Structure formats: structure tokens, C-alpha cells
Image (cartoon, rainbow, N blue to C red):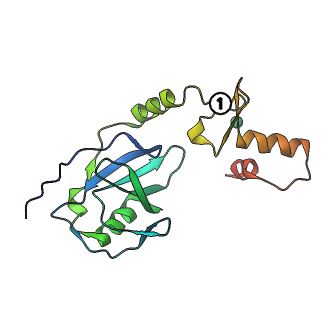
């Protein structure tokens, strides 16, 4: 059977993670349904595209399951590229040779993010919205959750240890 699904490459970022390699799941790949990927309570079936992505400041890679328009529908795990490729091979047999690299470097993806979050930067630590869990706005400026908990801990030293401390020990 001929594959008539148009193969188009992904955008530089999916869910704010940089796309490293991607693949279309059409033939010669064969969907086996051998892995359970859940999106909410729904079991995720066959998707059009897969991408192995990496969040900035994170070493681990993530496998995203995407529709034809490259919307992320599900995420099936974290690991190295080899581990995630092996995982994909279980669900889509013969897909191994079809992975393609995205010709967009880290700097390009980073500057894409800078533009995207130009206005959403913590006034205290200069992190972008995508680098923190949450950002609080006063209308005049923004502060991230890491800084809030750091200041809270300084102000109330007896409060439970938090995220900012974990980061320092890394
Ligand atoms: Zn901050």
C-alpha cells in the first residue's frame, strides 16, 4: 500500500522542548499497539508523527506522540535517544531507520524561545517562563516560583525545604 500521508518536518519546538529527531509513522513502519500510552484516561492509539525532544537545561530526552499537524497528543517516556528509539520501535516496528534529524541548532531554538518569552522573564533571576514552574505577575513585572519559595524560605526559615534548595544541591 502506498503511503499518501504528506511528510512534513516539525517546528523547532514542541511543548517548549527542542526537537532533536523526528519520524513519520507511515509505512514501512507497522503499528503494533504494543505499548500503552495514556492521555488523560484515554489510551492513545496510532499517531502520525513521533519526535524525540529535549527541554532546555534538561539532559533527559522525551518521546512525544504527535498528530499530523505536530500537536503533541501524548508523551511516552524519558530517557536517552537510544532508549526512546527502542521504545518507539516496539510500538512502530521497522521505524528505526526512518528517524530524521531536525536541521535546527540549539542556538536557533534558544533564540526562538527568547522571542517567545521576551516579556515573561523573572525580574530577580532572569529565568524565562519555560525555565520555571510558574510565573507571578504584578502588572509591573514578573517573579518566578523558585524566587518566591527562596524568599519565603529566607523570611520563614522554619518552612519546609523546597525546590530552590534541591537545585542548589545538583
Ligand atoms: Zn526567579
The front one of 86 and 131 is 131
Q: Residue at x 54, y 44 (%)?
A: 57
Compared with residue 19, is residue 83 higher up or lower down, i.e. above or below?
A: below
Q: Residue 69: percent from the left, percent from the top?
A: 31, 47
Q: Decide which of 4, 14 is in the foreground and name it.
A: 4
Please name whichever residue, 46 or 25, is drawn nearer the observer in this view of the structure: 46
Report crowding for label 1: few under 14, some 14 to 19, many 20 or more residues within 10 A (C-alpha): few
Residue at 36% x, 47% y is 20
- The quadrant in which residue 141 appears is top right
- Which residue is situated farthest in the left direction here? 1
Query: Which residue lies most toward the top here?
Result: 140
Image quarter hosting the N terminus: bottom left
Residue 35 is left or right of residue 29, and the answer is: right
Is the shortest distance between ligand 1 and the CB of mark 1 under 8 Å? yes
Image check: 129 left or right of 157? left
Q: How many numbered dots are placed on residues in this image?
A: 1
Mark 1, residue position: 126
**Position of residue 155 measured from the top left corner of the image (x, y, whole percent):** 90, 41
Residue at the (39%, 65%) spot, across then down: 83
- Of the four image quadrants, the one with ligand 1 is top right
Amino acid at each position: 500500500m502506498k503511503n499518501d500521508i504528506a511528510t512534513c518536518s516539525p517546528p523547532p519546538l514542541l511543548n517548549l522542548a527542542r526537537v532533536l529527531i523526528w519520524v513519520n509513522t507511515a509505512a514501512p513502519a507497522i503499528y503494533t499497539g504494543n505499548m500503552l500510552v495514556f492521555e488523560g484516561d484515554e489510551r492513545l492509539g496510532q499517531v502520525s508523527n513521533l519526535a524525540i525532544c529535549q527541554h532546555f537545561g534538561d539532559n533527559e530526552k522525551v518521546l512525544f506522540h504527535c498528530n499530523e499537524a505536530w500537536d503533541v497528543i501524548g508523551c511516552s517516556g524519558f530517557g536517552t535517544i537510544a532508549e526512546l528509539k527502542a521504545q518507539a520501535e516496539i510500538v512502530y516496528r521497522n521505524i528505526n531507520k526512518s528517524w530524521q534529524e531536525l536541521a535546527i541548532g540549539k542556538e536557533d531554538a534558544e533564540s526562538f524561545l527568547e522571542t517567545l518569552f521576551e516579556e515573561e522573564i523573572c525580574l530577580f533571576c532572569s529565568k524565562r517562563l519555560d525555565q520555571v514552574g510558574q510565573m507571578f505577575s504584578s502588572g509591573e513585572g514578573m517573579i518566578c516560583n523558585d524566587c518566591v519559595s527562596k524568599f519565603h524560605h529566607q523570611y520563614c526559615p522554619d518552612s519546609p525545604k523546597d525546590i530552590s534548595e534541591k537545585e542548589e544541591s545538583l
